[in-house]
Amino acid sequence: MDDARARTGSGPGEPVAHDSAALHVAGTALYIDDLPVPEGTLAAWCVPSPKAHARIVSIDLSAARAAPGVAAVIAAGDVPGRNDVGPIFKGEPFLAENVVEYIGQPVVAIAAESVAQARAAGRLVRIVYEDLPAILTIEDALAKGSFVAKPYVMQRGDAPAALARAPRRLKGTFRNGAQDHFYLEGHIALAVPQEADGMAVWSSTQHPTEVQKMVARALDLPASAVTCEVRRMGGGFGGKETQPAIIACIAAVLARHAGRPVKYRLDRDDDFMITGKRHDFLVRYDVGFDEAGRLLALDIAFAARAGHVADLSTSIVERALFHAANAYHVPDMRAVGHACKTHTQSNTAFRGFGGPQGVLAAEHVIDRVARAVGRDPLDVRRLNFFGASPRDETHYGQRTTDFVADRIVSELAADVGYEQRRRAIDAFNAASPILKKGMALTPVMFGVSFTAIQFNQAGALVHVYTDGSIALNHAGTEMGQGLHTKVRQIVAGEFGVPDATVRIAATNTARVPNTSATAASAGSDMNGKAAQAAARAIKARIADFLAGEYRTSVDEVGFAAGEVRIGAQRLPFRDAVQKAYAARVQLSATGFYSTPKVHFDRARAWGRPFYYFAYGAAYAEATIDTLTGEYAIDRVELLHDVGRSLNPAIDLGQVEGAFVQGLGWLTSEEIVFDAGGRLTTHAPSTYKIPVARDLPRDFRARLWTGGENREDAIYRSKAVGEPPLMLATSVFLALQDAVEAAVPGKGAQIDAPATPERVLMAIEAAR
Amino acid sequence: MVDTIRFLLGDQPVALSDVDPTTTVLEWLRASAGRTGTKEGCAEGDCGACTVVLTEPDGAGGLACRTVNSCIQFVATLDGTQLLTVEDLKRGDTLHPVQQAMVDAHASQCGFCTPGFVMSLYQLYRTYPDGGPPARETLDRALAGNLCRCTGYRPILEAAERMLASPRVRETDAAEAKAVAALEGLRRKTGLAYRDRFFAPLNLAELAALLQAHPDARLLSGGTDLGLEVTKAHRTIGKIIYLGRVAELRAIVRTNTHLEIGAAATWRETVPALLADWPALDELFARFAGPPVRNAGTIGGNVANASPIGDSPPVLLALDAEIDLFGAAGMRRLQLADFFLDYRKTALAPGEAVARVRIPLPAKGRRLRAYKVSKRHDDDISAVCGVFALTVENGRVSNARVAFGGMAAIPKRAAACEAALEGRPWTLATAEAAAAVLRRDFSPIGDMRASAAYRTKVASNLLLRFWHETEGRAATRAVHYG
């Protein structure tokens, strides 16, 4: 254990514990299902569609309405406002309307005294369906031209022409699997009717404003009549960015009909069956290169399973395109994205938001190129890194002025003794007929900002009370990532008081309005700056007042160590606050931040969509058993760039946690549908996220100390939520390397996730 | 007269008389006891967010403690035990050393899985022998039943090391004696009979009477399968006879010829007895569910539910186990191979319960390996489970047992494969020939765990692995469980 992490400091840069850690371990941190509910609160359950695609001929609710304990039974026609939770496009119903489009889709919602009674009533609902043809795979959607939106193209130069000229050329197909978020706390909403038709909603959501907006729309109310609050989520990972609106709208409409509060909590099976996952992709590419492995042209097409509606799929596909070259310069490049409509759950945001799929595809391609030219993949990676002009421009027009992937990769390669490890592994493989080892060292370059520019804004509201205590409200939500802890450190640091002086309030749309989702890794960047602005506004007023009182200049007023310094004088912070209050100085302020410099011309697919890039690199070693395909990840070393860390303990936790989540995505986590489109992996008994043993025995992770953010992000830190997930690419490619060692030169390829079955069958197919 | 379900919640006595006996412990804690610290993550005993600790007198004046998944335990099974939840650990404002270690190691992020981890670590804290720091293997095994989606586990492992690094704070003898006395006070003279729904006989005589009186009752032991009928299939269960208190069914006896394991002995109790004679089974049983499930689940349940993917039946088949069935008419004995009739169908008659499993003690020189192949190493259900037992005399295979799970509608021996081994020299060529014959024994299905082709290939290759391992010819294991 690094001694630095054991220090108990305060303020930005210190490795302080998560603000709720003591509550987490005692079981006293309250999640929505733990909140005391008003008397008479009902429980909800939804009747799911048993069909992947069918027309609803008739619905008979009479028996269900008469069932014991039932207070409300509703279908699409009972929604008073709009039955639509589409975040970008219209027409995304939360209760099936006329047709059902996936197995598990809520068709009828029931509120009863207990969940058991709601379920029992659900069995009495009679729905007649008429089957319609279902599209269940990406291939089928591509063949039938089934999309949720038009294809999107990003390009620079003339890829087809450059391909035609290239000395070497390789075509291929690569797939990655979907991934369930598996936040430990499933979706939940509690809707409590208020006076004058208002509705208060507690929702496990990363996006309270979206829930507020959608509930208002569903109830035909102005947004001002609806509040949404969340203190914390039991994990989000993107799964609670848009889809909480489905749950909240159902709860709210039921509450409206019953005239009573309604809690709608999805159990694990329902959560899997109703909500979307990380998009699985089918990637086809045509790459041109020279004999050294230098990339000359890349024509790459990404097709994602969007599911039955668009949700955020177009933006997710777009981010896959942005990351389709990862950290490499490709002179002539075309990337095309398709968001395929299928009759399955609507896939949604998941940590990385399409970026991981883009990075994984890029790393797969470069791995194939390296093998084609007979060079070590790391050499080919280094050969192709972004560099000085003109090799500093991405295929969407952004200059990579802050590029440090080369430095991080060099540092890590030296750390692990890359060449030595390669020789050791080659020697092992030569002597071992059944077990084979592989290794890989891969970089990550991830663009930070919402690519929909308007979301790059945040607000905060800070109150200083007369006893010197401080209440902090901001637009961000806490899902475990430590955002509240970091923003508290920033505000405490501004006022020069211990962190404990600042109390973090639940995120509430009535206190900070028009918020963006806590997403895109931008939570600390944006909310930290907004909260800092609010704190500084209050400080300026206090300083201004004290400077007048003490007949000095505001420059002579400072806030540190629990005191306010005015020239040579010192006042306890609390006394200064009381003086200011007595003099009628406003001790409350809002703060606002909008990310500078970002712009993107969507029609031309050209601009500067990212404020900056976050970088990292990972080294992985794996051993596979060629009799069963089982494997061990023997060693992993991570080196990740967070700029100047706001909280090294929390940042390291994000790096390690994201890596293991990525490891799960690429190894044991497999989403499987049966031939009829029914999801057959819908609980931890069938869907396997990593457990403790899956953390490699030799696992080292550290934050890169080689630089700070070149942009003026909060305290020169960098976003950390998503980028390190892609460090797990190293594990996948180490497994690919081991497969290559088992059947050298046969072009054996594994798709993701690399389950033992895929590993074995790739070897068998090549034999 | 309505009997009551009596237990301790922390140090407070509880008597329940109006609760549905199939209410889960978790549901009761959260909805009725006001304890919301324990969480529901899956309601099937796979994620561990609901982990609690149960203690019972250990018969030596102390308390035996074990973790269980409160999400699938019926509240009526608490009768006579002490239930400890995450709320019981703090003393005043002071965190328990387990909790403090979790804070110090930054081991919680979203916090939702944390109470479950705290309870699994608390169990380790109470039971870890004094001495050196825990091996990573020890921690991996202790935490195999708990899922965390945020941290990636490194800080949780660090917390476990930290909590064991400082001198441990034990319950005082006085506090422990008080709990033992309170639990002794709850000890019954005759079995619990709760609302004509839930019966917990204490001995075979009581069980016989109940089986006769209620032939329609469902038999419950660990509840790790039956519990899911309530929490996952949302079915109502009528009468239940709980076998977990029948003294004779909990006994594990080693005779001169057999190891006899009572059907209601938990895996926690059974595994050490098995490993004493068959150490090669260590890996399989380390990977068999997670600790909270093994602490509740029983050998009787694993055999009687006749799942084609249970991990103990292939082992028991390869070991030539017998099974004793108990009913009002007394005991009868079957070869285990004759017990499994068809998919989830057994020779068990109505009014009959599995009483014990008898395994002949191993002959000298018997070679045994049990292999489990699954997507995840720990706490996963087998795609294929293959067990191989073989005796080589004068260079030839004199007796072979090959049994598989996941390859047919029932756990099944591979007759053709066994025949292809017996009488032949134990060579790679023999193993390869016998592996090829497996295709005659099985035509497995494909499902979300594995394709039929993969199952077939792996089953064959496991026999080759067995040869390589027993002949020591080449390293075959990528993952090590030591």
Image (spheres, coloured by chain):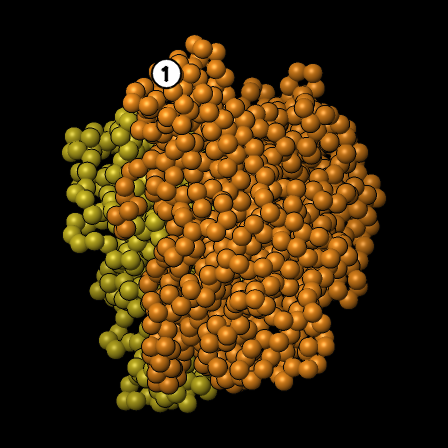
Chain colours: A orange, B yellow
Which residue is located at x 40 percent, y 48 percent? A644
Q: Quadrant of residue A573?
A: top left
Q: Position of residue B15 (x, y in %)?
A: 37, 25
**Residue A727: % across, % down:** 47, 60
Q: Which residue is mark 1?
A: A550
Residue type at mark 1 is: Tyr
List x then y, in percent, for residue A759: 50, 73
Q: Is residue A242 visible?
A: yes
Observer-nearest of A347 and A109? A347
The reply, left or right, for residue A8 in relation to residue A112 is: left
* Parent chain of label 1: A
Element carrying mark 1: loop
| In-image side of B70 versus A506 (left or right) | left
Residue drawn 41% across the image and 84% down it: B431
Compared with residue A479, is residue A764 higher up or lower down, i.e. above or below?
A: below
The one nearer the camera, B463 or A89, is A89
How crowded pointer 1 is (Cα within 10 Å; few <14, some 14-19, many 20+) is rated as: some
Residue occupying the point 32% across, 51% down: B157
| Residue B82 can be seen, yes or no | no
Q: Position of residue B344 (x, y in %)?
A: 53, 58
